[in-house]
Each structure stands twice: as C-alpha cells, then as structure tokens.
Amino acid sequence: MEKILDKKRLDDWAAALTNYEVQAPSQEDGIWGFQPVNGPVRLDHTNTKQPPKEFAFPQREVFFTFEQIKGEAPRLTQVLPQAPRHAVFGVRPCDGRGVPRMDKVFNDHVEDTYYNTRRKNVAYVGLACNKPPSANCFCLSVGGSPVSTDGLDVLMTDLGDRYFVAAVTDAGKALMAEAAKVFSEPSATDQKQVKQAHAAAVAHPQRAVNNPDQAPAKLKASFKSPLWDELARACIGCGICTFLCPTCHCFDINDEVHGKAPLKGQRVRTWDNCQFPDFTMHSSGHNPREGTGARLRQRVGHKFQYFYENFGMHQCVGCGRCITECPVGIDIINVVNKVAENAA
Amino acid sequence: MINLKDVRDAARDMLAKGEVRAVIGYRRGSRGMFAEPAFLDRPEEADELVWDPTCFHNLSLYLVHDRKHLAHAGKKSGAPVAIVAKGCDARSIVVLLQEHYFGRDDVYIIGVSCEGTGVVDERKLARHLNGAQASNAAFDGDDFVFTTAQGEKRLPAREVMADRCLECRNPFPKEHNLVYGEDKTGRQLEAPFAALDRFEAQGAGERWENWARHFDRCIRCFACRSVCPMCYCDECVVDSITFPISTETTADEKANRIRWIERSAARSENITYLMTRAMHLAGRCTDCGECDRACPVNVPIRLLNTKMEKEARDQFGFEPGASIGGPSLVASFLDKDPGEFIR
Amino acid sequence: MSEQQPYEPKIVAFLCKWCSSAGSDLAGVSRIQYPANATPITVPCTGAVSPMYILSAFNKGADGVLVSGCHIGDCHYLEGNYLARRKMYLIMKLLDFIGVEHDRFRMSWVSAAEGAKFAQVVTDFVNDLQPLGPQDKLKRAESK
Ligand code: SF4
Ligand code: SF4
Ligand code: SF4
Ligand code: SF4
Ligand code: FES
C-alpha cells in the first residue's frame, strides 16, 4: 500500500489512531526523545538520543511480585506487561533494523514473554533519512540504508510538502487503514520523486567500515591483539555506548524489597552493561574481563563477530550513537577498521 | 598564544630522556574536529599532540586509572607521568595530591593556560553550527574559528564556551612543572556561579519541577561518575559488588542485604545516587565540568556541584583545589561555622 | 479527609547515644507528653551520620529526618558534632536546592538531661511536618 499524505494532515492521521498510544520525537531539555503525542507531530528531528528499543525492552521490567508472611510460604504473582498498543512515529531506518535483531535475541532458544508481549503491541512508523542526520551515520556499511524498510511497519519519505507513505507489513496497512481518508493516491510524479529521494539518500556520503563482510573473520583472528587495550586506553567504562544502542540487550535481574513485615517486593529486570567493570565480576573478586580492552573487544566483537556467527548478520545497524555520545571519542568504525587492518 | 610546537618539543624531549613514563595529552580524534585523550609512550608520537578549544576533557582521570593499573599489577610507579592540564584540571590534580592519591613526584604537570577564553560546550556549538560539520577548531583571541566544508566559521568564544569557563576565575594552572600561555587569572566573562544563581532565583516549587524532570531522565549510565577524577572509589554505593555472595549466602540474606540504591533507573534511586555523589564531591569537585558534559541526557549535574562549591565558599571560606596542604572540607571545621539552623 | 485523624508524619531520628538518645529516654521516663512519630536510630556520635543516611531515610519513606547530638563542646569524641554541623548544613542546603521542603530536615543539640527539650523538638517537628503531608519526592515507589 502506497499513499501520499499532505504534511498538514499528519496530525489527522495521528489523531485517528485512537486505538494506539501514539509516540513521536519531541525535544525536551535539548534532548530528542519519543514522547506521547500531545500537540502537533513534527518529524524534523535528527535522531532520537535513545532508540525506540524501550517500547519492547524497557530499562526496568517487573517479572513478578513476592510477599511472604512470617511462617508462611512465599506468594509469587506474575506481572505481565500492561503496555498499550504503541504507534511509534519518526523511527529512523537504522533503528528499524534494530528491531528484528532484538526479536532474534529474545526468541532464540527461549521465548521471552515479557519482550514478546510488548513487542507485538508496537508498530514502527519509519522516516527515511533523505540526508543522514548525523556525521557518524554508517548504515550503508552494515547492510542497511537510509531508506531501509527492514523492521519497520511503515516507511514515510519526506517529499517537501507531503510524505510518501508505504506500508511494509500488515500492521502498517492497518495503521494506514485507520485513517484512510487522510491519504491520497500517489501520482506518477510522486513515484518518480520518491525514487529520486531514495537514490539521493543512498548516494549521500557516509563514514564507512571497510570490508564489513570480512569483519567477523578479521575480528576472530584478532582476539589476542594488543590493539584492544591500545584502542580502549581512553575508555572510562561508562554505559553510554551500550545503553543508547538500538541492539544492546544485556540485562540484570534483582529483587527489590519494598517492605519487611511482611517481606514484599518485586523481581525486576533492568538493563545491564558489558562496559561496567562489575558486569563480569565474580563473587570471588576475579574478573575475567579485567580491563577496558577486554570490554571493548566484547562490545565490538558482539556487534561485528559473535552475532554474525550466530545469526548471519551484523548486530550493529550503524546508527552512530555510540560514536557521537562517547565522552572520550571511542569510535566503533575506527576500532573495527584498525583491528581488521592489523589482523593476522 | 600557546605555540603547539613548544608543547610537542617538551613532550618529545621528556619521553626521549626517559624522564617520564608517558605523556597524557590531546590529539585529533577520528570523529570530526573533536580532540580525544592521547597517551604517548614514545618520543616520535609527540607530534600527535594538539591544543584547541575542543580539548575539554579533564585528563587527570587517567592519572587515577594509571594508579589503579599499577596497584592491580602490583607494580611500583617509577618515573612520573606527564599530563597536559588546564586550570580546572590542575586543580583536580591538586585535590588528588591533597588526598594522597599519588605523590607530587609521580606527576609532571604540563600546564596550559586557557588565555582569554576556555573550551567549547559541544551542545552550544551544535546549535551554532546548525548541522554543519567542522573539521578543525582553533583559538583566536576572543573568538573560536571552525573549519567547515562551507569555509571558515568564526564565532565569539563566549557564545559557545562551556558555562564553567565563562564563570572560571582562574583559567590558569597554578600548580605546574611547566606552563604555556599567559596567566589571565582574574579574567571574568560571567560572574562566578552565574548559572547557579539563575537557577536558584526560582522558587522551591519550580526547582523541584525542574529537578524531577532531570532526575527522571537519568538512565544511570554512570558516565558522570566514570568521567570524574574524584570518583575514584573502588567500591561505590550504587554497585552490586559491595555485597559478597558465597554458596552459604541464604535467599533471606540476599533479600535483606543493605542496598542503598536499587539498580532501577527510577526517580527515587536516581536522586539518591546523584545527591550522594554531589555530597561526596563537596569540597573536592573543581568544576571541570566533565560530568555535565558527559551526561548523554543533559542532566545539569554541574548545578548540584556548584551549589556545594558556593556554600563551601560562602559559609566555610573553602576553595576546592586551592592548595595541596590544605584541609578537606568535610574533615575540618571552624568555630564560626554556621549553627543557627540547629535547634 | 480533614474531618479525620490529623496526618501523622513518620520521622526518622538519628540520636547520639551519649546525649540525645538518653534525652529521649528521659522524656519518656519523666512522662512528658510528646508525639510518638519518631523512630529513633541510635548512633555513636552525630559525626558518624553520613549524609547518605539522611537520603536513605527519605528514600525509604521518612516524612522528616532529625539528627540530634551533644551540644557544641560536649561531644564525647570532641569534634564529631563540629564535623556533623558542616556535613548536615551541606545536605540541608542540597535538599533545599532541589526543592525538598525546608522543614523536612532538622538538627538539634539535646543533652542527656534535656528530656523536656527533646520532647519540644519532636513536637515542633511534627507540627511543622503535618501541613506538608506525606513526603513523596525522594520516596522509593512500588512501581509497575
Ligand atoms: S554499536 Fe553503535 S553504531 Fe552500532 S548500532 Fe550500536 S550504538 Fe549504533
Ligand atoms: S574552567 Fe577555567 S581552566 Fe577550566 S577549561 Fe574553562 S577556562 Fe580553562
Ligand atoms: S564532579 Fe564533575 S565537575 Fe566536579 S570534578 Fe568531578 S567530573 Fe569534574
Ligand atoms: S546523570 Fe547523566 S551521566 Fe550520570 S548516570 Fe544519569 S544519565 Fe548517566
Ligand atoms: S558524641 Fe554526641 S555528638 Fe559526638
């Protein structure tokens, strides 16, 4: 299904989605983030600081609550997410490609009920990047593109005063069907213009990972390379690169106690982070990933080698967030290129 | 004006003579114009050094890293490590020396003056460059000059400088072994604590509304802690490693262990974390601004720290990082300390 | 709501064992009437009260936090209360800065002989806390 949406009617589409909680990028305190729509939708964002992964994988998820009255058996009550149906507007194609990667992680071997319950309630409405929104975008290097539909339910392309709106999935068609009246049929000119816009977007220069297809083998051969320590010398071990990554998914599980008599609380899953020194810390005090080099290797290896070995695709989708946001300039493109160049 | 060649020559010389184990400075990064931390071990690397308005990092953090590595490897320190330090960075080093984190002979301070200006605030700069990408930044009197694809872009420094630099009273590293650039101590582009005063002019209700929003936004990435040279504790109250678990630990003990702060990035926990941190930095934070800069979600952490700094100055006559032999703020007192608030 | 019982604030009171803790006992044995809102936590000296305790008490749901110790000059460890005075001043200012009501934190000097003063301090604190209602700014919420 391909339609034309006059920019002036974008709000009408959003308003028609009464069965959804509509989310769109908005800026608060200088930060672009997805917020429930309340007012006009303006898709003039660069990229959001945080990817849309929170809709299926929030930073905090309650698994169950527990309560124990002294002398009695503990009572556990499962808490399934009560997430509303979400329609998320303004998703960049790289972040869209993050979705199927997360789907794999949470459904390989074990199906994660919490993730899946949320996930099936999210529709991702993408916005093609006519021009890469960041100097550190490199989607083209990792099999993506600024106009990729992978993982999206709808892809919108900005044609000046109107959007070219293409449904990608049935969920996307349903989203468009909710407001059939706001759309019109694309003309031959529209079709031509969208092709031109997409061709220009793909032709736009980007930074690049050299020979990305060879990266998995090169990284594999470089496990013991001294370069890891060298490249990670400035790393401060914060969690920015992973917390903001659309495909990082590691988590921790804790019991949070909210009362002692009776003992009660919640078992919660929170994001965790391979760059934190305590991530691999054993209770003996031994840490198998002792230094920042080993941790950088883990992160980059996961993105460009291990995930590839497991699922046949790079886990990195080239959004560039970890590069832009790193306070000390650790640059995954540079790291992969340097390590690969020096591989045995 | 600092002549970069002088700095490079000095670094090369020290490394060649083996007077220092390494030189920590700045070099051009792989992402556009921004400088990044550089670690030079060999004299021939000295030409990598740069000095420009994007040298915002407080490198003294890496002196702390170095000590931790040495301690872990059970090594003695040997020759000192040289470090390029701005005024605020040098004051951090003074605090570390004051706290005996390392000795004065363990560090060789290559001081650089910020002269009339200071360093850029990436966020302010992004607003001014309006999407344009710059490949180089340079000091030029009261201006910063950026090289972009569209040509040279000159901006008055004060429009894109970090708040801390606008308010800085001492843009010169008083504690140093070598120093480059002119001492412009006393130059003042904005009143000290100007940003804090602006914030404090609001009523308590508004202050809370603002902070509630900021605290909610924190994702607990701990970049603020990781980037801070003063946050050197091996165990922090927020980490899970503070509770040793063995095969003997019962479920009850696990459930009942003291956890000051939960892992969840919830408002209450974020507040406890950030307020604890601010308290722990009172009298130690030298306003290098790194925590504020590093925060990916713009939590104005600097306000918490400067609030403590201002109280310390006004009430206790205390200046962080002023002298190596001076007392610590919270381990000292004066008879005339305020006490009227106590019943 | 207003017709019902007045709201009873929960106070966590960090009391120095050499003075205020004994002062509170004295208030009790002297049968001085004062509200029973304070949960006492005995500490060896006010100097041992970390600002973290204050934050943690609020985090776990205290409506008000009291720190009470020996008068200046009377600290068993000579300097503990001087150090506490500084630290508590700073945390008080920080709480105020983020917009927590000023009256939620209080400090007092109460000697072992001042049972009546202790009762007064608690009574005043309760009176000042009542109009503020429950403290929910720093309190850990049982969220979904
Ligand atoms: S690794 Fe970095 S560039 Fe790749 S998807 Fe994650 S945040 Fe984006
Ligand atoms: S705070 Fe002062 S010394 Fe530090 S970078 Fe800014 S101007 Fe220089
Ligand atoms: S608290 Fe922030 S400003 Fe202060 S020394 Fe640490 S990093 Fe620098
Ligand atoms: S305040 Fe900012 S830098 Fe610090 S933990 Fe929170 S999000 Fe991270
Ligand atoms: S012993 Fe009471 S305050 Fe120090």
Image (cartoon, rainbow, N blue to C red):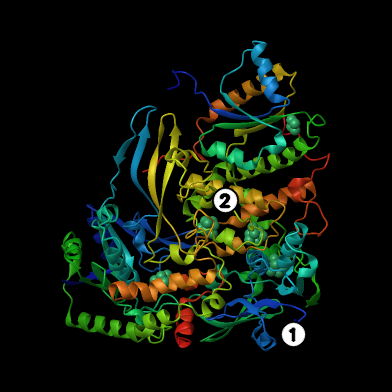
Chain ID at mark 2: B
Quarter of the figure that contains the N terminus of chain A? bottom left
Chain ID at mark 1: B
Neighbours of disc 2 within 10 Å: few (<14), some (14-19), many (20+): some
Count of numbered tags: 2
Image x and y of residue A60, in percent:
39, 51
Image x and y of residue B334, in percent:
82, 42
* Amino acid identity at mark 2: Leu
Earlier sequence position, callout 1 versus callout 2 = 1
Using the rendered view, name the quadrant where residue C18 is placed: top right
* Nearest the eye: A110 or C40: A110
Using the rendered view, name the quadrant where residue B125 is placed: bottom right
Image x and y of residue B238, in percent:
54, 50
Q: Which residue is mark 1?
A: B3
Residue A320 visible, this orientation: no
Is B221 left, or right, of B104 in this rendering? left
* Nearest the eye: C11 or B306: C11
Is B61 left, or right, of B109 in this rendering? left
Q: Residue lying farthest front?
A: B248
Image x and y of residue A108, in percent:
26, 63
Is A279 left, or right, of A63 in this rendering? right
Alpha carbon of mark 1 to alpha carbon of mark 2: how far? 40 Å
Residue B274 marker: 2
Picture layout, residue A165 above or below residue B252? below
Picture layout, residue A34 above or below residue B52? above
* Amino acid identity at mark 1: Asn
